[in-house]
Image (spheres, helix red, strand yellow):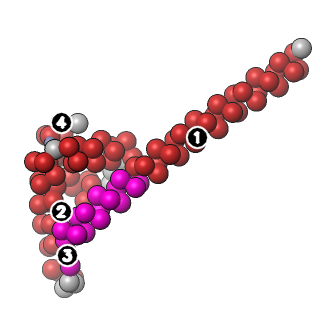
Amino acid sequence: MKCTQFEKMIPDFIQKKMDFVTLESFCRHADSCENCKEELTIQFLVTEGMQRLEEGEAFDLQREMDLRMEQAWKTVNRNNQCLKIGTLFEFAAVAAVTVALVWILW
Ligand SMILES: [Zn+2]
């Protein structure tokens, strides 16, 4: 993912409107690109900060930003595991059908 692309997606990330695939490359970029991570943090602080000021809540946004990234990674990893298990099941299903066919046609 390019930096310009990343920047355009920041609002989607903050509003949690991202699909898994995008989320994964987004997280990877944030982890490997200091500039974008900083940009993301700033936008997060501004967007969420305005919201909280309106709601009058106490907050620690830097910490929340870290938590948000952590959550995003967990979501990505969980989804990847699901995909792997899904592939495994598919493979098992295909194998079972093949065996059945061989059995019937023999
Ligand atoms: Zn970047």
Image: magenta residue range: 59-75
Task: Give the mark nearer the N terminus: 1 vs 2.
Answer: 2
For the point 11% across and 60% down, the residue is: 42
Q: Which residue is mark 1?
A: 86
Q: CA distance from mark 2 to mark 3?
A: 12 Å
Q: Secondary structure at mark 4?
A: loop
Q: Residue at x 33, y 47 (%)?
A: 23
The residue indicated by pointer 4 is 2
Other residues around mark 4 within 10 Å, as few (<14) / some (14–19) / many (≥20): few
Find out if the beta carbon at label 3 lies less than 8 Å from the nearest ligand 1 atom. Answer: no
Q: CA distance from mark 4 to mark 2?
A: 19 Å
In front: label 3 or label 4: 3
Q: Which callout, 4 or 2, points at the residue further toward the start of the chain?
A: 4
The answer to whether 27 is drawn above or below residue 62 in the figure is: above
Q: Return the residue at label 2.
A: 44
Q: Are marks 1 and 2 in contact (CB under 8 Å)?
A: no
Give the residue type at disc 4.
Answer: Lys
- Identify the image quadrant of residue 21: top left
Which of the marked residues, 2 or 3, is nearer the chain's N terminus? 2
Tell me the quadrant of the picture where the C terminus can be found.
Answer: top right
Amino acid identity at mark 2: Phe
Could you tell me the amino acid type at mark 3? Asp
For the residues labelled 1 and 4, say whether their Cβ atoms are less than 8 Å apart. Answer: no
Picture disc at residue 1: none
Residue at label 3? 60
Predominant SS along the magenta part: helix
Rendered image quadrant of residue 14: bottom left
Label 1 crowd (10 A; few <14 / some 14-19 / many >=20): few
Which mark sits nearer the N-terminus, 3 or 4?
4
